[in-house]
Image: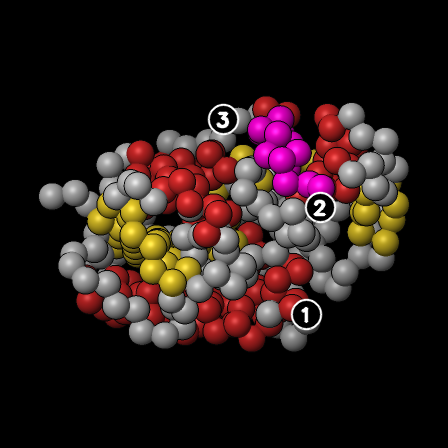
Amino acid sequence: MKKRVVITGAAGFIGSHLSETLLDLGYEVIGIDNLLTGDTANIAHLVNRDFTFIKHDVTNYIYVEGPVDIVFHWASPASPIDYLELPIPTLKVGALGTHKALGLAKAKGARFVLASTSEVYGDPLEHPQKETYWGNVNPVGPRGVYDEAKRFAEAMTMAYHRYHGVDTKIVRIFNTYGPRMRVNDGRAVPAFMSQALRDEDVTIFGDGSQTRSFTYITDLVDGIIKLALSDQNDPINIGNPREMTIKEIAETIIRMTGSKSQLVYRPLPTDDPKQRRPDITRARTLLHWEPKVQLEEGLVKTIEYFRGKVK
């Protein structure tokens, strides 16, 4: 029997790549998405494969016929633009959506994999961030709707593991980039690329000295699948430990696109993290995973995709 997986948020950036890779590995994939921030264009090329799409809001009861081996819970707005415009749906999918997805895993005797985020660390006082760090999060700030939704989702996932015995996994995802990101996503790489390809001013928030570490999508998906198939239940960081400033990534994109763009500076948004870099010791030792794709290599593929999208 083919193994069957359910992916919530399957029409999103990461969900669509995860769907495609699991199909390539011989799984049957059932993708669920309410298309609030996802797009069927991301999964249109999967229609003639062993892929079923269900349009559904996972904050409501999830029904899937037949056996399920793994539930990947990826449904959530994930960019600052989205969760600032959609604060209540973001909280609902982190709480109710996680509850419903865990309920499906429990009912089917399936493994459960939660897409968590480096945002659970907030504006970190520990650097780099280990999984044992509890974070520095403002629960009542504008970013709190996403940070706390994911922190609650982690707590509920561990409760189902401890109380119901569900085999759960938590992946803490650091900044990821690649094809199928939305042009107006609001995150650094798509924002800089869309502006640079139009020869517009490239907007940096703050002085550009804040740091991020960028993981190419294929590396992330590889890490997610390794974690899903492992015996690990504690959270694991999946990210690229190569740290660079926001100004450096903007200048790199301007150079690689051959753009005439200039950098312009705007005030830093509330609670924007000043530094972000994963400690991936656990991923290296427990999953034998580390990123392989160099930043410039990943940017070439991403720029090629954005050239076809930017008007």
Q: Residue 304 in magenta? A: yes
**Residue 311 in view:** yes
Residue at image mark 2: 191
Residue 281 at what x, y percent from top left? 47, 37
- Which residue sits at x=36%, y=37%? 21
Q: Disc 3 marks which amino acid?
A: Lys
Colour scheme in use: secondary structure
Residue 239 at what x, y percent from top left? 52, 40
Residue 123 lies, with reference to residue 177, above or below; the image says below
Q: Residue 77 in magenta? A: no
Q: Disc 1 marks which amino acid?
A: Pro
Q: Is residue 15 left or right of residue 193?
A: left
Q: Is residue 184 left or right of residue 56?
A: right
**Residue 168 in view:** no
Q: Please rate how many residues cluster around mark 3, counting C-alpha atoms within 10 Å: few if below 14, some from 14 to 19, many from 20.
A: few
| Residue situated in front as seen by the camera: 276 or 62 | 62
- Label 1 close to label 3 by CB (< 8 Å): no
Q: Say what secondary structure mark 1 lies in.
A: loop
Residue at image mark 1: 142
Residue 140 lies, with reference to residue 160, above or below; the image says below
- Which residue sits at x=11%, y=43%? 1
Q: Which residues are magenta?
A: 298-311
- Which residue sits at x=71%, y=41%? 311
